[in-house]
Amino acid sequence: MRASIIIPTYNRYPLLHALLVSLVSAIEDTDAEIIVVDDASTDDTTGKLAIEFPSVRLLALPRSMGPAYSRNRGAEAASGRLLLFLDSDGVVEAEWRDALLTADTGTHLLLGNVVDFRSGRRQSVPRRATFIGKSLPCPPERANTGPSCNLAVPRDIFEALGGFDEELPYYFEDSDLCIRAARAGHPFKFVADAVFRHHGTERKTGEAIRLQEAHSTYALL
């Protein structure tokens, strides 16, 4: 199988449903699979998913462990040579999958384009990691980090890196993976046509700021 689309989710079934509808062509493709990892949701995600999307592979975790753990379990179960990570709070545009598969050489991490769901304004990418564990906007050819809500990694590179660091259950676990990939000499490619329309915001508040600062410091150390 060429590609595995891995989606962690927690109590977001209406948003997950919209995402899977936007992925309908991938669901019908025998060369790709969709794996949803339910992080112990309490909104009957597993029951609804089994009825409405029976062709989607479902991994149901017995207790909530966070998206980093969920993505790693999805990757372990995946059959594809390319792992395509998406978050469950957005939809993909029609060209998303083909743009990533066309850009795939088996050697690059592919950074998809993340835009605001309503306005279409670009969020977060392309960016380049700095030596202090942060990242800054940059020209596409210098990008070396991106959010795991729209990130594709060749399976052998992902396994060589040991996957996402599960000590960072959320916030900065994606940047940490990309920083380790860059240090290991793996090239990056920004794929502007692989668009994920994101309901979430790139602005952090409250506890999210504390966690991101703590995790970025962890990654730096």
Image (cartoon, rainbow, N blue to C red):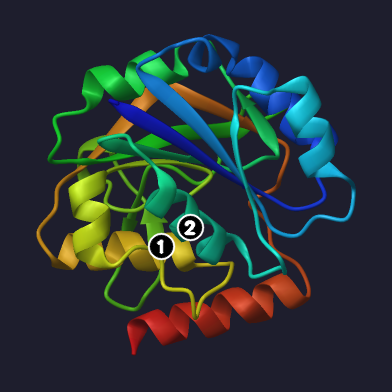
Of the residues tagged 1 and 2, which is closer to the observer? 2
Q: Is 61 left or right of 172, judged from the image as shown?
A: right
Figure disc tally: 2
Task: Categorize mark 2 by other alpha carbons within 10 Å: few (<14), some (14-19), many (20+).
Answer: some
| Residue 129 visible in the picture | no
Q: Where is residue 81 in the image (x, y as percent from the top left)?
A: 25, 36
Q: Position of residue 144 (x, y in %)?
A: 27, 52
| Image quadrant assignment for residue 109 | top left
Q: Is 2 left or right of 35, judged from the image as shown?
A: left
**Residue at image coords 32%, 46%:** 138
Q: Position of residue 216 (x, y in %)?
A: 46, 78
Which of the labelled discs sits on residue 73, or is there none? Answer: 2
Which of the labelled discs sits on residue 50, or is there none? Answer: none
Are the residues tagged 1 and 2 within 8 Å (C-beta)? Answer: no
Q: In this view, does 44 lie above or below 80?
A: below
Q: State which tag comes first along the sequence, 1 or 2.
A: 2
Task: Categorize mark 1 by other alpha carbons within 10 Å: few (<14), some (14-19), many (20+).
Answer: many
In front of the other: 187 or 163: 163
Q: Which residue was labeled with disc 1?
A: 175
- Type of amino acid at the residue the image marks with label 2: Arg
Q: Is 82 left or right of 27, judged from the image as shown?
A: left
